[in-house]
Image (cartoon, helix red, strand yellow):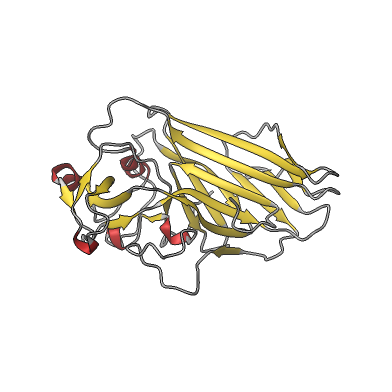
C-alpha cells in the first residue's frame, strides 16, 4: 500500500539489494545484487491504474523493454516536494523492541552500517574474482522512502562464526533487530498536471527509455521490482544474506549473517529465549554511511 494515497508512482522493492542516498547529489540509489549462480531473478512489473467514468479502478499491465543490464536513472517531472525524504514518525522515538513504533518508518530497513553491524562502513569494490556484483543501479531524483511491509519473524545480526555456533538468543543481544523491512516502499508525488510523471533514462547516453505520465485522466502507477530467490531445497547453513559480502566488504570486520528466530514466549518481556529457524533470508539492506554508487 502506498504511504501517500495521492502518490503518482509507488515503487515496491523486494529481495536482495542495497539502498543509499547519494551524498553528492542527494538522490536515492537502489543497487540490485546480481547473483547469476545463486537462483535470483530480477523481475519488474509496471501497472497503470486509472478510474472509469463510473469511478471503478482499472489496472493495466505496462509493457516495457527496459534493459537491466545497464544502470538506469528515473527523473521525476513536476515533483510536489523535490528531493528525497526518509519517512519517520516524529511523534515517537524509533525502537526495534517496541511494537508501537510506526511500522512504516524507513529505519526498519536493515542498516548494514548500523549498530547491529558494529557501525562499520562498507567498502567497494570487492575481490574481482567473484562474479557477484551490484548491478544494475537505479537512481531516482525525488520521492519518499519508507517500509511498506515488515516481516512477521524477528531477526538477529551475527558474525557468521557466531551464527553457526549459536542456538539461542534473547532480545537484549547486541545484534537484535526484531522484525525488519520485507517490502521497501518509495512514493513519488507529482503536481496535478497531465505532463507530470517519471522518465526512465539510460545512464550511458541520457536517452529516454520509458515515459509514465499522469495524462488527462490522472493515471497512477505501481512498479514492483523483485530480486527474490525461489529456491525450496536445503536451507541449512548460511543464508542468502551473506551474498552481500561477495559484492561489498568491511575493511576491519568479517561477514555477518541475518538469522530468523522465533520468540518462545512473546509475553515474556526483554529476556525471551529465541531459537533459530533454518530459512533463506533475502532482505533489502540500507547503507547509512556510504557516499553513493559510482556510475
In the displayed image of the protein, which residue is found farthest to the bottom? 91
Left or right position of 251 against 248? left
Q: Is residue 256 visible?
A: no
Q: Residue at x 34, y 61 (%)?
A: 114
- Quarter of image, res 64: top right
Which residue occupies the foreground of this view, 15 or 99? 99
Left or right position of 280 against 63? left
Q: Residue at x 54, y 52 (%)?
A: 185
* Residue 132 on image: x %, y %: 39, 36
Against 170, residue 235 (above or below) is: above
* Residue 282 on image: x %, y %: 39, 40
* Residue 112 on image: x %, y %: 36, 55
Left or right position of 118 against 186? left
- Quarter of image, res 161: top left
* Residue 106 on image: x %, y %: 47, 60
Q: Which residue is drawn at 40% across and 68% down?
A: 94
Left or right position of 141 against 150? right
Which residue occupies the foreground of this view, 292 or 162? 162
In the displayed image of the protein, which residue is found farthest to the left? 165
Q: Residue at x 71, y 61 (%)?
A: 79
In the displayed image of the protein, which residue is found farthest to the front? 267
Against 32, residue 272 (above or below) is: below
Which residue occupies the foreground of this view, 66 or 168? 168
Q: Is residue 200 visible?
A: yes
Against 130, residue 84 (above or below) is: below
Amino acid at each position: 500500500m502506498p504511504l501517500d494515497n495521492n502518490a503518482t508512482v509507488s515503487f515496491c522493492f523486494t529481495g536482495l539489494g542495497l539502498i543509499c542516498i547519494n551524498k553528492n547529489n542527494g538522490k536515492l540509489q537502489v543497487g540490485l545484487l546480481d547473483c547469476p549462480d545463486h537462483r535470483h531473478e530480477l523481475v519488474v512489473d509496471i501497472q497503470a491504474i486509472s478510474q472509469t467514468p463510473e469511478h471503478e479502478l482499472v489496472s493495466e499491465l505496462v509493457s516495457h523493454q527496459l534493459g537491466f543490464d545497464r544502470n538506469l536513472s528515473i527523473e521525476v517531472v513536476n515533483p510536489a516536494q523535490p528531493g528525497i525524504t526518509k519517512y519517520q514518525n516524529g511523534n515517537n522515538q524509533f525502537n526495534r523492541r517496541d511494537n508501537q513504533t510506526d511500522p512504516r518508518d524507513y529505519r526498519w530497513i536493515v542498516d548494514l552500517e548500523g549498530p547491529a553491524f558494529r557501525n562499520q562502513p562498507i567498502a567497494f569494490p570487492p575481490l574481482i574474482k567473484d562474479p557477484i556484483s551490484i548491478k544494475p543501479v537505479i537512481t531516482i531524483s525525488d520521492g519518499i522512502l519508507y517500509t511498506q511491509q515488515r516481516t512477521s519473524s524477528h531477526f538477529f545480526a551475527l558474525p557468521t562464526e557466531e551464527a553457526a555456533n549459536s542456538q539461542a538468543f534473547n532480545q537484549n543481544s547486541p545484534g537484535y533487530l526484531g522484525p525488519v523491512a520485507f517490502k521497501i516502499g518509495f512514493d513519488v508525488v507529482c503536481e496535478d498536471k497531465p505532463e507530470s510523471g517519471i522518465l526512465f533514462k539510460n545512464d550511458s547516453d541520457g536517452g529516454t527509455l520509458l515515459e509514465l505520465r499522469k495524462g488527462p485522466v490522472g493515471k497512477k502507477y505501481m512498479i514492483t521490482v523483485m530480486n527474490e530467490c525461489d529456491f525450496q531445497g536445503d536451507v541449512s547453513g548460511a543464508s542468502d544474506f551473506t551474498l552481500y559480502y561477495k559484492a561489498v566488504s568491511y575493511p576491519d570486520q568479517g561477514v555477518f549473517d541475518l538469522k530468523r528466530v522465533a520468540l518462545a514466549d512473546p509475553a515474556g518481556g526483554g529476556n525471551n529465549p529465541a531459537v533459530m529457524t533454518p530459512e533463506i533470508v533475502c532482505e533489502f539492506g540500507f547503507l547509512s554511511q556510504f557516499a553513493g554508487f559510482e556510475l
